[in-house]
Image (cartoon, rainbow, N blue to C red):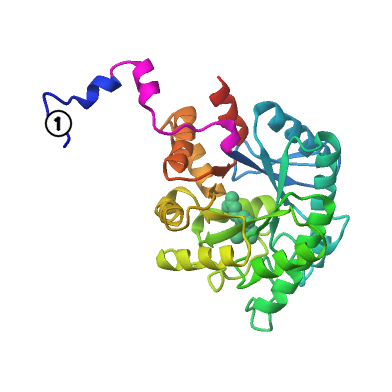
Amino acid sequence: MIASYPHARPRRSRATAWSRALHREVLITPSDLIWPLFVTEGTGVEEPVGSLPGVSRWSVDGIVARAKEAVALGIPCLALFPNTQPERRTDDGREALNPDNLMCRAIRAIRDACGDSIGVLTDVALDPYTTHGQDGLIDANGYVENDATVEALVGQALNQANAGSDIIAPSDMMDGRVGAIRGALEGQGHVNVQIMAYAAKYASAFYGPFRDAVGSSGLLKGDKKTYQMDPGNAEEALREVEMDLLEGADSVMVKPGLPYLDIAVRVKEAFGVPVFAYQVSGEYAMIEAAVAAGAGDRDALVLETLLAFKRAGCSGVLTYHAAHAARLMGA
Ligand code: PBG
């Protein structure tokens, strides 16, 4: 039985800062963060992304500098996304299989500079490599073909693992890709390379700035609704997660983040596995727009939204605010 007022006064424990700290149920720390970074060609290049104020594409040397910064801040993992040069994009996205592509060079450079002091997560999907901006191989009608795409994704995942990726993160939403990738990794001796499945990834309006950052927004025809999930569905997310776990995923992701916090909670409650949330580009842009409009305090908005993911049961969050947030947490 819970006592009622005036015997119980919940405000009593909120009256001082030390007491609030003592009673706080969840914490967010730099070790909960994964920092997504965009890689571009060249040396000494920093290209600001217009729709993501404060976020830049970096050439490989700049990525290495960010990796060292992350280590110093206590951020345990980076997520890499390439802005492939237009002349290297093809209908079949074969640049994804090139062992010397931008992604592989960035992975090796981070490994050379930082050893095992930071994890590298690599996204598996063909959209940064295709001329049509879809995540897979399309047929004459523009439909993304499942099984042929899975074959290409297996090649892409092996290419990343061979370059030194620690976590393979399939973001394509093809059926059966986790099992196919797991099998191929085992077959090649990559037994400790993890798979974080974008298990519940929605066909969302919040990905726009990301597509600008990887250079696929101008190319994309149509949408991704035949493979990414319908925003109205929650039960289906549980089925997707269950399939990916049975196929060998080590952890699962819910994406986008805040608009799908209910999904993160349900996945955690149903399966008890490590769940990660991706606070995506449009969510980042929304916070920055609010700040620019004088509608909120950046530091407070960043910390409060990140804490929400921990409260929902997530093990960690992919966020473009990672470095800034880690600095705030250390302060
Ligand atoms: C690629 C991919 C996307 C994102 C992560 N991986 C874009 C998409 O599916 O169109 C979005 C991330 C973000 O918006 O920050 N498949």
Q: Report whether 222 appears left or right of 290.
A: right
Residue 121 colored in magenta in the image: no
Q: Ligand 1 shows up in which quadrant of the image?
A: bottom right
Is label 1 in a helix, a strand or a loop? Answer: loop
Q: Residues in magenta?
A: 15-32
Q: Is 141 above or below relative to 37?
A: below
Of residue 56 and residue 37, the one placed in the foreground of this image is 37
For mark 1, what is the residue?
3
Residue 264 image offset from top left, x and y in percent: 45, 52
Q: Is 142 above or below relative to 275?
A: below
Q: Report whether 227 appears left or right of 294.
A: right
Residue 42 image offset from top left, x and y in percent: 85, 44
Q: Estimate how packed mark 1 is, as few (under 14), some (14 to 19) or many (20 or more) residues with alpha carbons within 10 Å.
A: few
Of residue 106 and residue 76, the one placed in the foreground of this image is 76
Residue 132 image offset from top left, x and y in percent: 69, 69
Residue at the extreme front: 1
Q: How many marks?
A: 1
- Looking at the rendering, in which quadrant would you find the N terminus? top left
Q: Quadrant of residue 143?
A: bottom right
Of residue 39 and residue 273, the one placed in the foreground of this image is 273
Residue 29 colored in magenta in the image: yes
- Residue type at mark 1 is Ala
Residue 72 image offset from top left, x and y in percent: 70, 26
Residue at the extreme bottom: 140
Res. 235 visible in picture: yes
Q: Is 151 above or below relative to 197?
A: below
